């Protein structure tokens, strides 16, 4: 016992013990501070901000202890101007409180693009060129010509449009295509189980028009529509040929049971 007291009374040993105690207390304090600062172990679920205005998204984020910031903008013709198109992290993800959610919104003013020269271009190439510029392929019309599915005229709002003219992104361009009498027939493809935009492209690639797009009650916003799948079409796919330029109606849903029947 006397030996222990002697050791403890040594100023070197005493200072070492006090230093060790100080380091221990400091470590505990820093750990506690960081735990409180980062809310260690606590996470919140990211809300779905789709179709909300930035003000609505900010209010909704605040209720969950989150923040939103506008990261980018795109132009979607069928969507309300200024509405949220997408977000990152996605809805349903688990994040720490205080996290900033990056929003992509629908542009208030659509950007302008230039009309390409599609004359003498094959239909598929023309469709791809329109898509790359943010333009939308509209109605396909056919006239007698040597080559089938080659663009003869490009039209905007019923009038021929020259290459280089400025248009708003999302504008619809109709095409007049050639049709060789010996190649005037095509087939309606089976689009059941195919997503919206892929189905529209496939219909156009077969020289057919979309007469109607019908989304059921499961599709409530633009994001839903992109994920919607064809569950029925009229006319149905068959081995019977149809004339190029004929129309097809597509019915779409998010309900997997509908298109798997």
Image: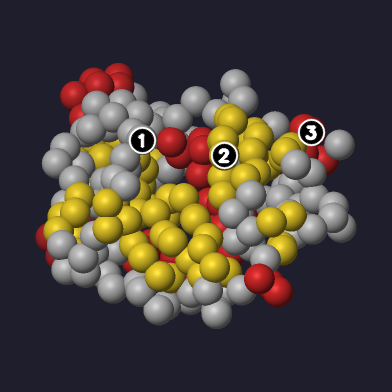
Disc 3: CA contacts within 10 A as few (<14), some (14-19) or many (>=20):
few
Q: How far from the left and from the top, in percent, is residue 97?
A: 31, 34
| Contact? badges 2 and 1 (CB < 8 Å) | no
Q: CB under 8 Å between callouts 3 and 1?
A: no
Left or right: 240 with respect to 52?
Answer: right
Sequence order check, earlier mark of 2 and 3: 2
Q: Is residue 141 above or below residue 145?
A: above
Alpha carbon distance from label 2 to label 1: 17 Å
Relative to 184, 177 lies left or right: left
Name the residue beneath numbered marker 1. Answer: 78
Query: Element at badge 3?
Result: helix
Residue at x-position 20% and y-position 50%:
168
Residue that label 2 marks? 211
The quadrant holding residue 174 is bottom left
Q: Earlier in the sequence, mark 3 or mark 1?
A: 1
Q: Nearer the viewer, residue 214 or 217?
A: 214
Q: Could you say where residue 119 lies in the image, as x and y percent from the top left?
A: 35, 74
Mark yes or no: residue 36 visible.
no
Q: Residue at x 27, y 51 (%)?
A: 159
Q: Which residue is identified by label 3?
A: 257
The reply, left or right, for residue 164 in relation to residue 101 is left
Front of the two marks 2 and 3: 2
Residue 199 appears at what percent x and percent y? 61, 52
Residue in view at x 14 percent, y 41 percent: 109
**Picture layout, residue 83 above or below residue 206:** above
* Separation (CA) of disc 3 from disc 1: 27 Å
**How many marks overall?**
3
């Amino acid at each position: 016992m006397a030996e222990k007291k002697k050791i403890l009374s040594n100023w070197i040993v005493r200072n070492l013990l006090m230093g060790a105690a100080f380091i221990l207390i400091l470590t505990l304090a820093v750990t506690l501070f960081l735990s409180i600062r980062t809310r260690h172990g606590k996470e919140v679920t990211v809300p779905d901000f789709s179709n909300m205005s930035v003000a609505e998204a900010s209010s909704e984020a605040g209720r969950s202890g989150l923040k939103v910031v506008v990261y980018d903008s795109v132009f979607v013709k069928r969507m309300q101007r200024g509405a949220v198109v997408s977000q990152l992290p996605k809805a349903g993800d688990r994040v720490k409180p205080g996290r900033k959610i990056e929003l992509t919104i629908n542009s208030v003013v659509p950007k302008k693009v230039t009309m390409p020269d599609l004359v003498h271009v094959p239909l598929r190439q023309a469709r791809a060129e329109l898509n790359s510029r943010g333009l939308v392929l509209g109605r396909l019309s056919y006239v007698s010509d040597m080559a089938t599915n080659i663009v003869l005229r490009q039209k905007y709002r019923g009038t021929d449009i020259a290459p280089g003219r400025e248009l708003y992104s999302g504008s619809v361009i109709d095409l007049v295509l050639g049709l060789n009498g010996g190649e005037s027939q095509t087939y309606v493809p089976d689009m059941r189980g195919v997503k919206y935009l892929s189905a529209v492209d496939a219909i156009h690639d077969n020289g057919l028009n979309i007469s109607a797009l019908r989304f059921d009650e499961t599709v409530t916003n633009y994001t839903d529509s992109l994920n919607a799948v064809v569950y029925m079409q009229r006319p149905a796919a068959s081995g019977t040929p149809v004339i190029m330029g004929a129309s097809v109606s597509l019915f779409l849903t998010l309900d997997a049971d509908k298109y798997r029947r």
